[in-house]
Image (tube, grey):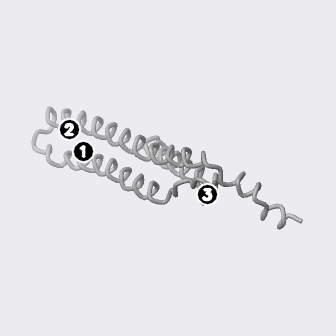
Amino acid sequence: MERFLLDSPSMSMAQCPSWAVSIGYLGVSAAVVFSNWGSAWGTWKSGVSLCHTGIRHPGSIMKNVIPIVMAGVIGIYGLIVAVILAQSISKPSVDRENQYSLYTAFAHVRSQINQKNQKNQKKSFF
């Protein structure tokens, strides 16, 4: 009985509505926003550390430039993830035969929220 219910056209429309694309693009924007926010935060923290190192240990300034560069790489990583996610989102068709499901849309959003939470958890250990 379940097989016939899942094959019905109304059930496929319920699983792949046309507005699922907007939720998917929310995941794309979250990838860019969270990664660039983390990159800016890391650059700020590393810059403050670089200033304090310049005052206390002027000879080791170049060692503290590496975290600033790595913080910039985090922003580029988020841009790459956003491009990959955006390419996987298919456009909704006019006759409402969509291939992009709600499950995939929420998976894209949740993947970026998990990425943000993992960055916060790493900060709490130090």
Snapshot quadrant of residue 12? bottom right
* Mark 3 or 2: the one toward you: 3
Amino acid type, residue under disc 3 in the picture: Asn
Q: Position of residue 7 (x, y in %)?
A: 78, 65
N-terminal of the pair, mark 2 or mark 1, is: 2
Is 108 in front, or is 19?
19
* Label 2 Cα neighbours within 10 Å, binned few <14 / some 14-19 / many ≥20: many
Instruction: State yes or no: discs 2 and 1 in contact (Cβ < 8 Å).
Output: yes
Residue bearing mark 2 = 50
Q: Is residue 43 left or right of 125 when viewed as pictured?
A: left
Contact between labelled residues 2 and 3, with CB atoms less than 8 Å apart:
no
Is the residue marked by circle 3 packed among few (<14), some (14-19), or many (20+) residues within 10 Å?
Answer: some
Q: In front: 40, or 45?
A: 40
Q: Identify the residue under disc 3.
A: 98
Q: Is residue 9 left or right of residue 44?
A: right
4 up-or-down from 93: above or below:
below
The CA distance from mark 2 to mark 1 is 9 Å
Give the Cα separation between the discs numbered 3 and 2.
Answer: 51 Å
Amino acid bearing label 1: Ile
- Residue at 11%, 39% (x, y): give it: 58
Mark earlier in primary sequence (3, 2)? 2
Tell me which residue sits at (49%, 46%) in the image: 25
